[in-house]
Image (cartoon, grey):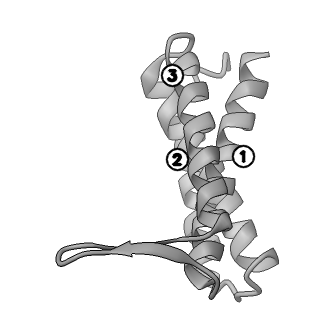
Amino acid sequence: MMYVLLVVYSCISALGLVLFKLGANAENSFGVESFFLQLNMNLFMIFGVLAYVVSFLLYLFLVSRFNLAFLYPLGAGIIYILILAATVFVFGQQLNPMSVIGGVLIIAGILLVNLSGLGI
């Protein structure tokens, strides 16, 4: 069950990032502008913030149940792969061979470092 929550946490974190990117590309926004700061928000960004809040709360729960040296790299690796998939399927961008090789190496490194955490 904890591993399912880890995947859910990763999916919600990746969703937040995708929503931030969609919001940054959107034209309909409202915001606050001052001398030092210009903050433009839209529904994509608001839902991105909500997704990040939920993922943060899940992370707080998970960090109390998992070894941090296991949780953080594995979660980050899952998020990285989900972002690569979103780059292709949501934004229609092309991945170059180096990105694919880099992603495979990152996942392989995370798995190698965490073999004891996976019970292997």
Q: Is residue 6 above or below residue 96?
A: above
Rendering coords of residue 92 (x, y %): 77, 86
- Give amino acid for label 2: Gly
Circle 2: element type: helix
Circle 1: element type: helix
Rendering coords of residue 71 (x, y %): 53, 28
Identified at 58% across, 66% down, the residue is 20
- Give amino acid for label 1: Cys
Q: Circle 3 is placed at which residue position?
A: 60
| Count of marks, rendered view | 3
Left or right: 112 as drawn, with respect to 7: left
Q: Circle 2 is placed at which residue position?
A: 109
- Work out how far the residue at label 1 is from the one at label 2, CA to CA, in angstroms: 21 Å
Which is more N-terminal, label 1 or label 3? 1
Q: In this view, does 120 lie above or below 37?
A: above
- Work out how far the residue at label 3 is from the one at label 1, CA to CA, in angstroms: 16 Å
Q: Circle 1 is placed at which residue position?
A: 11
Q: Is residue 95 above or below residue 64?
A: below
Residue 14 found in image quarter = bottom right
Q: Quadrant of the N terminus?
A: top right
Closest to the camera, between mark 2 and mark 3, is 3
Which is more N-terminal, label 2 or label 1? 1
Rendering coords of residue 69 (x, y %): 43, 26
User: Does the image show residue 39?
Assistant: no
- Give amino acid for label 3: Leu
Rendering coords of residue 10 (x, y %): 66, 42
Which is more N-terminal, label 3 or label 2? 3
Residue 25 found in image quarter = bottom right
